[in-house]
Image (spheres, rainbow, N blue to C red):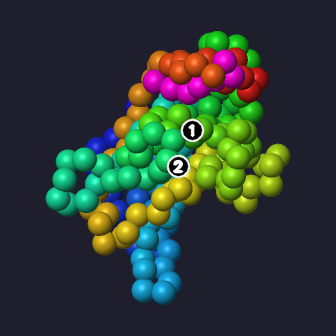
C-alpha cells in the first residue's frame, strides 16, 4: 500500500541516496551514510512524503548483502537474538480502532527480537532517540509526513546491496513484555491504546 513498482534511485549526493517516484504524494526515502577514520557506514534511513494511504500501516525494513538471503543485523542490545529487521508504525493523526487519535506525524519503532521499542517522543527508549518524525510539538526540524530511523547498529556500507520495504495492515505482530513482565503479542494500535494514550 502506497509503494508501487518503479521506485528508483533519484539522486546521489554526498552522504545520501534519495529514492523517488517523481510524483507528488508517493513515498520517498533517503539512506544516510557516515564516514571518518577509514570507515563508511549506513547510519540512518528516512522515509518522506508518506502518503495518506499508509496511515495506520506497518512498514518492515530489512537490509541485505549480496551473498546471503538472511538480512543483516540492524540492532543488538544483548537482550535476545540480534534483530535483522525493524518495524515502523505510521499513525499520523490516526483514529485508532482500539481507541483514541494519535498526534500528527506519530510513529512507533519496534525491534521484535530484542522486544525493544520507542516512539517519536522517546517513550520508554532509555537512551538516545532512534526515531524522529516531523512532529512540530517536540522540536523536530523534519517536514511533516517524514520519519527518520537512526540504526542502533550502523551497517558497513560495503555490505549494503539491497534494502527492502514492506507495508502491511497493523496486526498482532508487536511483541513486548508490557508492564506485566510477561511476553505479549499485540498490534501497534492496541499497544498504543493500552500503554501510551
Please identify the residue farthest to the top as the structure is shown: 98
Question: Magenta-highlighted stretch: main secondary structure?
Answer: loop
Q: Quadrant of the C terminus?
A: top right
Q: What residue lies at 72% left-to-right and 39% top-to-bottom?
A: 123
Residue at the extreme left: 67
Q: In terms of sequence position, does the residue under pointer 1 or pointer 2 come before the other?
A: 2
The residue pinned by badge 2 equals: 77
Q: Is residue 119 magenta?
A: no
Q: Which residues are magenta?
A: 173-180
Labels in figure, total: 2
| x then y, percent, for residue 133 | 66, 48
x, y percentage for residue 137?
82, 46
Extreme residue toward the bottom, this view = 37
Q: Is residue 142 above or below residue 137?
A: below
Residue 71 as seen in the image, left or right of residue 143: left
Q: Nearer the viewer, mark 1 or mark 2?
A: 2
Q: Which mark is residue 116?
A: 1
Q: Residue at x 63, y 22 (%)?
A: 181
Q: Residues within 10 Å of mark 2 (few under 14, many from 20)?
A: some
The front one of 195 and 50 is 195
Q: Quadrant of the N terminus?
A: top left
Residue 175 forms part of the magenta stretch: yes
**Any part of residue 44 in sight:** yes
- Comparing 182 with 15, the one in front is 182
Q: In whole angstroms, how far apart are the C-alphas of marks 1 and 2?
A: 9 Å
Label 1 packing within 10 angstroms: few (<14), some (14-19), many (20+): some
Residue 93 x/y as whole percent:
69, 30
Amino acid at each position: 500500500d502506497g509503494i508501487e513498482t518503479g521506485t528508483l534511485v533519484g539522486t546521489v549526493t554526498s552522504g545520501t541516496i534519495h529514492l523517488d517516484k517523481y510524483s507528488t504524494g508517493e513515498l520517498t526515502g533517503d539512506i544516510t551514510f557516515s564516514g571518518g577514520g577509514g570507515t563508511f557506514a549506513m547510519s540512518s534511513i528516512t522515509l518522506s512524503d508518506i502518503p495518506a494511504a499508509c496511515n495506520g500501516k506497518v512498514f518492515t525494513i530489512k537490509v541485505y548483502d549480496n551473498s546471503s538471503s538472511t538480512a543483516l543485523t540492524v540492532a543488538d542490545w544483548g537482550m535476545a537474538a540480534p534483530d535483522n529487521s525493524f518495524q515502523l508504525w505510521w499513525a499520523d493523526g490516526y483514529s485508532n480502532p482500539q481507541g483514541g487519535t494519535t498526534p500528527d506525524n506519530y510513529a512507533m519503532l519496534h525491534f521484535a527480537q530484542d522486544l525493544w521499542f520507542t516512539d517519536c517522543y522517546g517513550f520508554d527508549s532509555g537512551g538516545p532517540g532512534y526515531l524522529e518524525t516531523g512532529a512540530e510539538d517536540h522540536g523536530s526540524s523534519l517536514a511533516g509526513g517524514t520519519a527518520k530511523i537512526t540504526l542502533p547498529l550502523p551497517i558497513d556500507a560495503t555490505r549494503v546491496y539491497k534494502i527492502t520495504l514492506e507495508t502491511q495492515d497493523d496486526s498482532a505482530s508487536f511483541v513486548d513484555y508490557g508492564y506485566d513482565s510477561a511476553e505479549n503479542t499485540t498490534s501497534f494500535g492496541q499497544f498504543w491504546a493500552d500503554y501510551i494514550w
